[in-house]
Image (tube, rainbow, N blue to C red):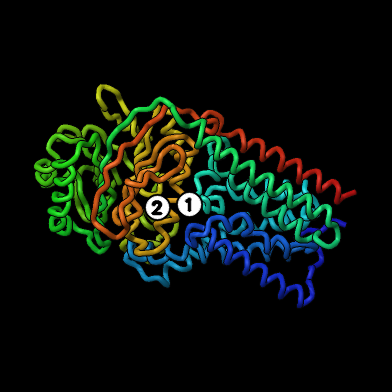
Amino acid sequence: MVIGLTDKPYVPNKIKQKQDILLSFCTVILFYLAFPSGGYGNLAWLAIMPVIIALNNTQGKYPFMLGLLTATLGWMCSIWWVVDGLTKVTFSQSNIVIPFVFIFCIFSALPYAISCWLHARFSWGSSIFGAFKSACVFTVLVNFIPSILPGNLAHALYLSPLQIQLLDIGGVPILFFIIHLVNFLLATAFIHRKSNKQKSITCLLVALSIWLLNYGYGYIKTTYLLNNTPSVEMTVAIIQPNLAVNLRTRDDWLQKAPLFQSVISQVVNNHHTDLIVLPEIPVPVSYKNYQQDPLIFNPVIKNRTILITAIEPINNQITESDSYHNTIELIERQQVTQLYKKQKLLPIGEYLPFEKQLPILRTLFPNAPNYVAGKNNTLLPLDLNGQTINIIPLICYEAVFTDLVADGVAKGGQILINAVNDAWFGDTVGRNVHLALALYRTVEYRKPLIRVTNNGVSNIINVKGQIIPNSQIKPLTVGFAISKVNIPKITSFYQVYPYFFIILCLLFCSYAIVSSQRKLNE
């Protein structure tokens, strides 16, 4: 008999239901604590173990619903900070934003639910090989379905450089696979601890071996293979102004401009810099489009090179009703030499998706911004002592998308600059989550990341995924940091073969499902 979603309903006894709900809540708590929102990243290695144990010997719709419940609650607990941020940026009420966030969490939970159903349907929790199959299915469904916020349990390890070096082979999916494989092996070991002690011990040893191999690769890579690599050095100043998000107008900018002038003057008058980087800020500013702004910047920047995040009006008209491009302006010798227009816009925060099909959205979010996406992945060439350094510009959450960065790297990009305004999320862990998602690009492509934000977390990350200590600025403060950034000439395996692990997973996943289905049909 083949068990599926349409078969006779499977209903466990009340004791098992209570146990399963408890195990589900344990996974939710562990997921929250492991995710950057919780700050205990190493819990990722056992976070989903409880719900996997609950899936043992379940059938039909039950494992799907249990997985859906667990993943939905896990996402809700981990990204609750989004509600307040979207409320502020759209001038709306939280009761309007919450349903949209809840729908997003359910949608994000579906791949986990389907994976749980397949794991239970084919009884993959009964063997070591089954653990590999389940981990592969989870990896394919969670990582290769497009998402507006591509975060997952793999990002829990963002502050553990030795544990994330495999990113340069297979990107986030390979780290996700390793973490989930260890979870499945540990769950299998627990399930068979009494019935088959030898299998239980074997699962534990395999899990430990995989963890050690991952750690060992990270140690060798960071200690030996990435050192003494020829590199170009540049001195970068990042400035964090800490502007409140309720400052939105040109008048607000003109009132705060002296603050910028003061901080920039401290940098220019006391330090050598090859580049000064300002973050994305809530007020409208543009060296190119506002006549007042060159008069504000020129006296203090002198002839230094500076990068600012600005607005580019559509049709060259600056009015309240017009649409805009969110842009980066590279200013050299007191003139804008390069422009980049943001390509990945934040849904609701910068535009309303499906607004034409659903006009009611504009009624619900009347003050939502109306930005227009750019179409080109533009590099910003910077002259550095006779050498050209190609900057990959990234505005706000663009840095979380590996495909966007990959395009810039393929065109010759050598360093990532991410201008961010996380002030919408207040003093919450949203800042840490955003940092975690962006940090992984440094290891995937072995390119340093300059990340400057309005109110934190501002820092510079090297090609090992390590935060340069003297580059950090305390969140919720006005300040600057000056650091030397090494730009090594490294090409990662992931950069050259970005689809290698994807194809490997898809092939193995297809084999796992087909072979398991055949076995059920026999």
Q: Which residue is mark 2?
A: 346
Q: Looking at the image, which residue is at 76% across and 46% down?
A: 513
- State how many labels appear: 2
User: Looking at this view, is 51 or 290 the one in front?
Assistant: 51
Camera-side residue: 487 or 330? Answer: 487
Q: Disc 2 on helix, strand or loop?
A: loop
Please identify the quarter of the rendering in which residue 512 is found.
Answer: top right
Mark 2 or mark 1: whose residue is earlier in sequence: 1
Q: Quadrant of the N terminus?
A: bottom right
Q: Position of residue 437 (x, y in %)?
A: 46, 49
- How far across and how far down the image is residue 510, in percent? 73, 41
Question: Are the two marked residues, 2 and 1, in contact with CB atoms closer than 8 angstroms?
Answer: yes
Figure quadrant of residue 96: bottom left
The foreground one among 180 and 392 is 180
Judge from the rendering whether residue 391 lies leftward or rightward of residue 13; answer left or right.
Answer: left
Counting from the top left corner in percent of width and height, residue 415 is at 37, 35
State the image coordinates of residue 281 (x, y, percent, origin top left). 26, 53
The residue that mark 1 highlights is: 148
**Which secondary structure lies at badge 1?**
loop
Q: Relative to 213, is 118 on the left or the right?
A: right
Q: Which residue sits at x=84%, y=46%?
A: 518
**Residue drawn at x 40%, y 29% as measured from the top left:** 488
C-alpha distance separating marks 2 and 1 = 8 Å
- The type of residue carrying mark 2 is Leu
For residue 96, say whether it is visible. Answer: yes
